[in-house]
Image (cartoon, grey):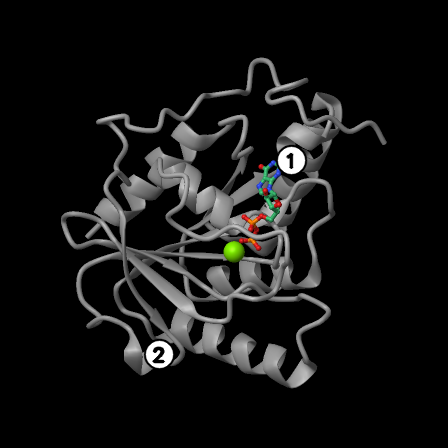
Amino acid sequence: MRQTRHPGHGLAGTQTQGSKNSPDNPLRGAAFVLAAHRLDQLPPDRGAEIAFAGRSNAGKSSALNALAGQSALARTSKTPGRTQQLVVFGLPDGRRLVDLPGYGYAKVPPALREHWKQVIDAYLRARQSLRGLVLIADIRHAPTPFDRQMLAYCASIELPCVLLLSKADKLPRAQVLARQREVDGEITKAGVRAQSIVFSSPAGTGVDAARKVVGALLGEA
Ligand SMILES: Nc1nc2c(ncn2[C@@H]2O[C@H](COP(=O)(O)OP(=O)(O)O)[C@@H](O)[C@H]2O)c(=O)[nH]1
Ligand SMILES: [Mg+2]
C-alpha cells in the first residue's frame, strides 16, 4: 500500500483547508472546562453539547484541535490509550464539546475497557443535552465492531452522527473514495442519521465541512 505524508496528496477536489482563526468557525474559542472520571462530575445537563468518540489513536484529539482551530486544545499523543476521562470544552456561548475516552486499545486491561464502555454507553443514553456524536475512524482500516456498535447505537437512540474518516492524507485518493463508499454502505445498513466526511487534520481536509455539520447540530434546539 502506498502511503504519503504530504498534506493533501491525492486528495485534489476533496480538500478544504480549515483556517485556524476563521471568524466563521462555529467552534471557535473553545476552552477546557473540566475532566470527569464519572458522569456525575459533568457540567449540568443543560444547553447543547457534541461528543467525540473513536478508537484510541484514530486521531480524535487531532480532529478536535483542527475543528476548534487550536493546535493544543486536546492533547494529541503517540502513546495511545492513556486518556481515560471525559474532557469537556466550552464554547464562548456555553455550548460544549465532550471528548470521550478512547476505546479499544489493546494494552488497556479488559476490566478497565469494559468500565469505560459502560460509562460511554451510560453517557450516550442519559445525556439530555447531547445533540450528536462525532465518530473518528482511521480511514486506512475497515470499520471495527465498535464503530458498527456506535452507529447502531446512534440509530437506536436517534442521535445524529458525523463520521470523520481521519488520516486521509495517508491513502491515495482511489482508496480514500473506496473506503468512503464502504463506510457509507455501513451507514445505510445501520439506518442511522449519519454522514461521512473524508478528513485529515494536518492537511485540513474536511475541516470546514465538519465544522459546519457540528455547528448545525449544536444549534438545533
Ligand atoms: N497523517 C496524519 N496523522 C494523524 C492524523 N490525525 C492524527 N494523526 C496522528 O495520529 C496519532 C494519534 O493522534 P491523536 O489525535 O492523539 O489520536 P487519539 O488517540 O484518537 O486522540 C498522532 O501521532 C497524530 O499526530 C491525520 O489526519 N493525519
Ligand atoms: Mg486523544
Numbered circle sitting on residue 20? none
Nearer the observer, 139 or 153: 139
Report the side of 69 relative to 204 (left or right): left
Q: What element carries label 2?
A: helix
Q: Against 135, is 14 above or below?
A: above
Q: Residue at x 64, y 28 (%)?
A: 169
Q: Which of marks 1 and 2 is nearer the N terminus?
A: 2
Report the side of 202 relative to 20 (left or right): right
Numbered circle sitting on residue 39? 2
Q: Position of residue 37 (x, y in %)?
A: 40, 78
Nearer the observer, 75 or 96: 75
Q: What element carries label 1?
A: helix
Mark nearest the camera among 1 and 2 is: 2
- Residue most toward the right? 1
Which residue in the structure is indicated by mark 1? 180
- Residue most toward the top? 12
Mark 2 lies within 8 Å of ligand 2 (Cβ measured): no
Mark 1 crowd level (few <14, some 14–19, many ≥20, 10 Å Cα): some
Q: Position of residue 140 (x, y in %)?
A: 72, 41
